[in-house]
Amino acid sequence: MVNILGFDLPLFVFALVPMTTASLLVLLERFLNVSRTQKNIMHIIAFMGAATDVILAFLFGYAILNSTGNEFSSTFIINLGADVTSLFFILIFTTVHFAVTVYCINYMEQFDELPRFYALLLTVVAGLNLIALSTDFFTLFVAYEMMNLCAYSMVAFYRNVESAEASFKYLVMSSSGALLMLYGVALVYGTTGSISFEALAAMSPMNNLVLSIGGILMILGFGVTAAMLFFNTWLPDAHPAAPPPAHAMLSGIITLGGTYGMLRTLFLIIPLDALTGANWNIVLIVVGILTTLQGNLFALIQFLRSDPQARNLKRIFAFSTISHMGYLITGLGAGTILGIGGVLFHALSHALAKGVLFMITGFLIYSTGTYYLDQYKGFGRRDPLIGVCFVIGNFSLASIPLTSGFWSKFQIILGLFENGNPIGVFAGITLLIFTFFAAAGYLWLIKYIVFDKSDQDPKYIENFDSVTFSRRKSWSMKAAIVFLAILVVLIGIFPGPVADFAIKAATALLG
Amino acid sequence: MVAIGTYGDFEVILVLSLMMLIIGVYGLVSKKSAIKVIMAIEILVGAPNLAFIAFGYAQGTVDPMTEAFVIISLSVGAAVIGLSLAFLRNLWKHFHTTEVDAYTTLKG
Amino acid sequence: MADFINTYSFYTDLFTLLVQPWFLIFVLPMIGALLSVILARFNAFIRNIIALISTGLAAGFALLLVFGQTWGEYALEIMPSNAVGVYFTNSINVDPLSAFMALVAAGLGFLIALFSLEYMKGDEAETRYWFFLQLFVGGMVLLVLAGDLILLYFGWKIVGVCSYFLIGHWFHKPDPQGELCAKSGIKAFLMTLVGDILLLAALGILWLALGTINITDIITGFSTVSASLQVLVALFVLAGAIGKSAQFPLITWLSSPRSVNIDAMQGPTTVSALIHAATMVKAGVYLISRFYFVFRQVEIDIFFVALAMVAVITAFITAASALVSVDIKRVLAYSTVSQLAYMFMGLAIGYLAYSTEEAISFEGFMGTQFHLMSHAIFKALLFLSAGAIIHSLGNERNIKKMGGLKKDLPILHWVTLIGVCALAGIPFLFNGGYSKETILTSAFAFAQTESSYAIFGWLIFGIGIITAFMTAVYAFRFFFLIFYGEKPADLKVHTPGPIMHGVTGLLGGLVIVTGFTTPLWFNAYFEPMFEGYNLHLAIIPSALEGWVTLTIVTAMVALGIGLSYLIYFKGDRTIMPTVRKYWILNVSHTIAKEGFYLDRLYSSLIDLFHWGNWKLRNLQTGDLNYNMSLLGAVALTITVILLFL
């Protein structure tokens, strides 16, 4: 139970609120025919759901930071528990979801399947919150699959060629990953006799091959969602196929579901495993670095392509997501307080920056109806608000000061140095060097969107102007973009509280 | 905690589950037909369930937790399969084939 | 641990902080940047006034720091506090070096803001210009005042970003200029990023080895770091400085050959004056000066030699390129790099001589600081005059198409003459002469000692002398080609306004005043940094080396000016006929003109990278079976590695 404003609420409320809202929306879709007013009702309901969730998360955060104990647990329907780490992730999930919901008010206006889309978003967040709150690996698996199923559906949302292909690939790869992970859980259960976090944390290490394989399968299984090296071949196909608001969720927070799972496995299973435990750090560091490299290089390849699908802005950002997931994995490998704190911080700053960028991408897609970079030339100039936010988002990803990305990436790199292992130092320097490739890509994007002249088909320019300069058509999209961009800059200037929070969580995890 | 090797009969089930895992992965890697890929996933769904059953039995008595796990995970698996069939239908609409080789419009 | 005068939390003591001059000096321009964006909506005039006030106040506070002389370090808590384990404490360090640099940055920032009032009038994106100009001043001051490496890096990147946007400032102009501007920004950012990355790596290594990133702590603790890490840190810091100061081999972002035409000179001339001549490119020199107190204690041969070699190579090749450039801004840009190389020479002497000849070492260091200041002033003057000339000629930048402007622009003619004399290093009257001489004297003095590095003393002295000669030639070539000779018929001139004349005149006055006054106060001012050591920097050379150097330099400068006079004033104003006659001259002329083919090298490297990258594309086939096999292969590899290795 957690005391929020004098009420004792079960932790399940974080899943209950979005799930109830989602059911309500689906029911309403059955009983109402879709018209403008009714769409507005849907918007309001979805907004209320998201807002309630984010407010609850912040109140809960306030409660947990001001309480003496570090952990909360409650049994309502299922066993749930929360510590500072869970809370940190819940705050990321709900904040991004809130921004996306606000964004959707304008963006999803064009679709009749609007309530279903909202329901998917809400269920994804419910699943993510359950992942963060689960106290045993089986609950984690169920929540993970709940989130995954909705994520597949979000990718398939448009039902065009792209999304059909991408969603199938995503489903096959991700669910086989989840099943591998479940197999790992079974092996862990078989060797330790328990899969609850509490019981596992209390056990002493053992030298058991089956447990080792279980741990490996779990981390690899989560790796599919966490976009590990070559476990991520679905990602650049699946993410761009989803509608842009869903893309923001997929890239910013759904991948974090996998990262969170890896984090838990790393702190609960790996310490038990005397056989492979010592090598995991190095393996994760190497895999993380290679992932980053892969993301950066493939993002640059997109600029060289000249086929019909060339220079799809969403695909470029999908590869950038891969590279940032690589940072998170490397940070997990560092295994130090700063490293893990950096992972949490970077998860936040990546989610915020990607939120900004995908929302802007969505804005451009919404207004022009095309996906390709060459048609977006100079739009950041036509509407400076979009241009400035685009620059802020890219700078945060390229880790340039005055944005949150600088501090978070920096913290991960210091964490790698703190590791003390020569491989850690080497990894830190390598990651820094990869920044160069990343920055090249981001700067080139800024050039396209902000610096170049609009020389594309005038009809695109007309469409863009008609959306961006009409307050009715663009207010909610711009509000969401500006909200996240301001968060990025604020955290960039005042990183203390967030970094403090992340480090508190890491300290609690490392004990 | 279990020392593997003491309970002869559960090991058979465990080995069976391992074989299912390997067959499932083999199917995913090699089968060109999307239907067969989905069947491979279905086999993969079975593997951890079987392992849970085996380990639940190995605890000495039958552990009710594992039964709950298996039932829930079966339903989750069913949801996954259902969704994958829906996606396959969607794919058929666009590609008119179930060969996964054809689904390569997105690459690079 | 460093002794802090006081500790301020960035969160709880924000209001107390806002009355501290050392805090205001970099925060005011940043606040001004935001304010001018907001106020630009209401009134353009208020926006400009805000910019002037914020930079002016920053300059005032910098003066306060310099004259107040209350040295000390203030802790500033920005990142996680002690409650969860202290990782690093940020601090602001006010010492003679940082206060002096802050004065240079803020003072020139203010003057150039004043100049921009007229120069940038009617620009399409004036608000953006003012925003980044003020942010730049704030970032630069933060860079120099930072007492720890993180704030230093913070400022380092902020100025980099401002430079990126200001170089690309005219991206909205019609192509090809707009396109070139955008690309130039990217090029500058990426090439300096190479250095930035390595600087950050050095920071990380220092933090790993010492558990602190406070510079004072690093100075006391550096000798305990293991030798291999010392070398790594020193080389990484040098790389950072090379990137920012555009030394060899990263010259081309600041100035590239005409055939490439993508460099920092695509920005407005005021920006070139402030960022790419007077302040930002000095950040590298500042960094090496800051680390002078760190690295001098340990003999890191590789670093010392690398510094000397980089400086020597850069000084020579950029002077050669400046000799054959025809773009008014690129001559100055190459010359900037060449003069920066002089500063690195001075620092190299400072490092090389420290273990054997402390006095010479300090002289090299002080000469560098002096030259830094005088170069900032005279190069700002030259760039601003060039800007005024470009402005009055309607964006003509080719000096071969100019001539005879003395009559139309008499005031600019005289101030440019002052700047050119200072650049050429004419002794006794101009600051550049004093400072260049100090550096060369220290090199000459060092060459005669019995140190094992003495050979580098000779090398630096020799190249320094040759470069001084070349400098005199190209400086006066620049001057004669613009102001003398026949005025081309199609050249329309409109006279610049009073602000431009006023600012350039003021800088011209400063060039002369700082020349002979600086040695009077410089020693006493910098003494706290040397713990009471009596420094030797005198108006009149005190020892034999001084007189010898003075004679040689004066002879070389006179020779250079004479040559320039003969060719570009008396002669037919071009050397091309002679060059074409001899193939050796022709080849070297082409090589110098092409910037020693560094740009060609980089573009082929990029092509190679793209080629390899394109091959990688085959890994992403999109085939499901293939994807699964790849997944399986990686999974199997990881499992095998974990279980059996």
Image (tube, grey):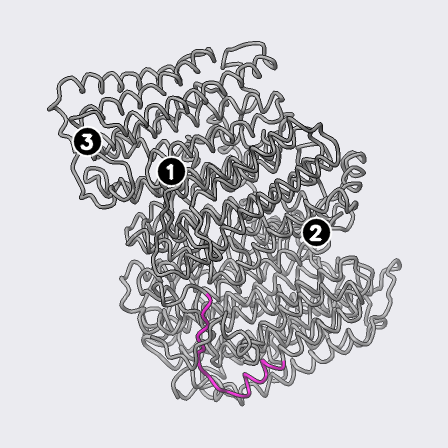
Give the vertical position of C571 relative to A41 (above or below): below
> Dot 2 lies on which element?
helix
Q: Nearer the viewer, residue A482 or C472?
A: A482
Span colored in magenta: C60-78
* Residue depth check, mark 3 versus mark 1: number of the one nearer the observer: 1
Q: Quadrant of the N terminus of chain B?
A: top left
First in sequence, mark 2 or 1: give its number: 1
Give the vertical position of A407 relative to C289 (above or below): above
- Work out how far the residue at label 2 is from the one at label 1, CA to CA, in angstroms: 46 Å
Q: Which residue is mark 1?
A: A78
Chain identifier of the residue bearing label 2 in the image:
A
Q: Position of residue C61 (x, y in %)?
A: 59, 81
Category of crowding for the residue at label 2, using alpha-carbon neighbours closer than 10 angstroms: few (below 14), some (14–19), many (at least 20): some
* Residue depth check, mark 2 versus mark 1: number of the one nearer the observer: 1
First in sequence, mark 3 or 1: give its number: 1
Q: Amino acid at mark 2?
A: Leu
Q: Which residue is mark 2?
A: A385
- Work out how far the residue at label 3 is from the one at label 1, CA to CA, in angstroms: 32 Å
- Classify residue C268 as left or right of residue C538: right
First in sequence, mark 2 or 3: give its number: 3
- Classify residue B31 as left or right of residue C398: left
Please report contact status of discs 2 and 3: CB closer than 8 Å, yes or no.
no
Give the vertical position of C496 relative to A203 (above or below): below
> Dot 1 lies on which element?
strand
> Dot 3 lies on which element?
helix
Category of crowding for the residue at label 3, using alpha-carbon neighbours closer than 10 angstroms: few (below 14), some (14–19), many (at least 20): some
Q: Amino acid at mark 3?
A: Leu
Q: Which residue is mark 3?
A: A209
Can residue A292 be seen by looking at this rendering? no
